[in-house]
Amino acid sequence: MNTFQGYLRPDGSVGIRNQILLLVVDECAEGIARSIAQTLDQATIVTNYNTCMYAGNEEMINTMIHTALNPNVAGALVLAMGCGSIDPQIIIEPILAAGKPAHALTCMKHKGTRSTVREGIALAKELQEYANRQQRTTAPISKLLIGIKCGGSDTSSGIASNPSVGAAIDQWIDAGGSAVAGELIELIGCEELLRKRAVTPEVADKIELLIAEEEKRWHIPGADVETMSIGNSVGGLTTLEEKSIGALHKTGTRPIQDLLRINHNHHEKPKAPGMYLSEVTHLCGSSGMHFAALGAQLIVWTTGGAGFNNPIVPVIRVSGNQQLINEDIDIDATGIMRAEEGINSVADKILTKIEAVANGEPTQLEGVGFSTCSLYQKDRRLEKTLCIEV
């Protein structure tokens, strides 16, 4: 695969889907968004449930802005109640600056809910008509960023699905593509291995520093916070380090170009093709939004459990767990566990699926059921308490 058929956006990025995004900056306005979405063929709602205050929410607001800039999004409608501190203009201005259509609508300025819903439907239909006029065109794979994630990991993850994805990603990078993995909490104990893959000493130091900061956030003495799920333990994993080594396989073996920061000051994105790490959270629903905000057009997800879908970025599911295989799974890696199939064979199937999904084929769960777009942000008060400066 050297090219794919995607939607060329005004900023030069290329999407594999043509989504209309309804961004709700005050949770009180979510009902308005849902009323508007009912009238559209396809729309995704992203709601800020954190608070309607501005200060302290900059990371979340940046995630909303960059999600709207994701190549899979054709246009966005931003909704606010009008009594909060988050001005919807600060969200639509960078979207408009990128050449993408966007509108802002405030309930209190539009004389109430019914009036706002009527105006919102009209604006959203404009966006839908714009999206419908977009045609797929040929683009190089250097325009395609793949997110890599794992969840509900078990022993089959480290033996079958993660190594298969890693082998596929190596081939993808060699062909000129880009990929990004996150979950720094999953990389505790892998620091020396990752340092050897960093392209510069500065990147190596950044990897080590940001993994250490993530460990600080989640492992505070005296606070019982679960970072290894019951499902992981039932699935056969015994320590965080063991879980990390298994998870590391899904990143392949190619050089790491950078570790992309996501916080209130920075929202770093890949500047050239290659393999990247990032501060994408390990929390499944929120990680989908982080990947969307980084510009990833699809996600490859290995699972020893189930779950995880994202309506903005299609998710290809890979599993080596015989008991899990059902119609939700895109790639069956159980042949590796039975010693009937090799890792490279499954890797080839993953690459074939990536090509098909990039060219428009839906994943097994795309458009089925309901998935939540969770917005995650680091707690600025905790960052200060832990002396984490960014």
Image: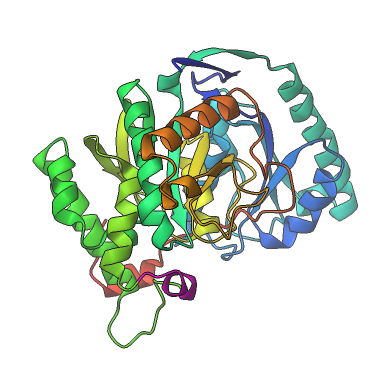
Q: Position of residue 322 (x, y in %)?
A: 54, 56
Q: Is residue 347 left or right of residue 277?
A: right
Q: Is residue 231 magenta?
A: yes
Instruction: Please say if 60 is above or below 364.
Output: below
Q: Position of residue 71 (x, y in %)?
A: 55, 29
Residue at 18% x, 55% y: name it: 191
Q: Residue furthest top?
A: 138
The chief SS type of the magenta part is: helix
Residue at 30% x, 60% y: name it: 244
Q: Is residue 69 magenta?
A: no
Residue at 43% x, 40% y: name it: 341
Identify which residue, 366 or 220, lies in the foreground.
Answer: 366
Check the image and tell me how it is coloured: rainbow
Q: Position of residue 374 (x, y in %)?
A: 58, 57
**Quarter where residue 59 is shown:** bottom left
Label count reads 0
Instruction: Please say if 282 is above or below 366.
Output: below
Q: Is residue 324 shown to the viewer in this render?
A: yes
Q: Quadrant of the C terminus?
A: bottom left
**Magenta residues, as a range?**
230-237
Q: Position of residue 176 (x, y in %)?
A: 34, 21
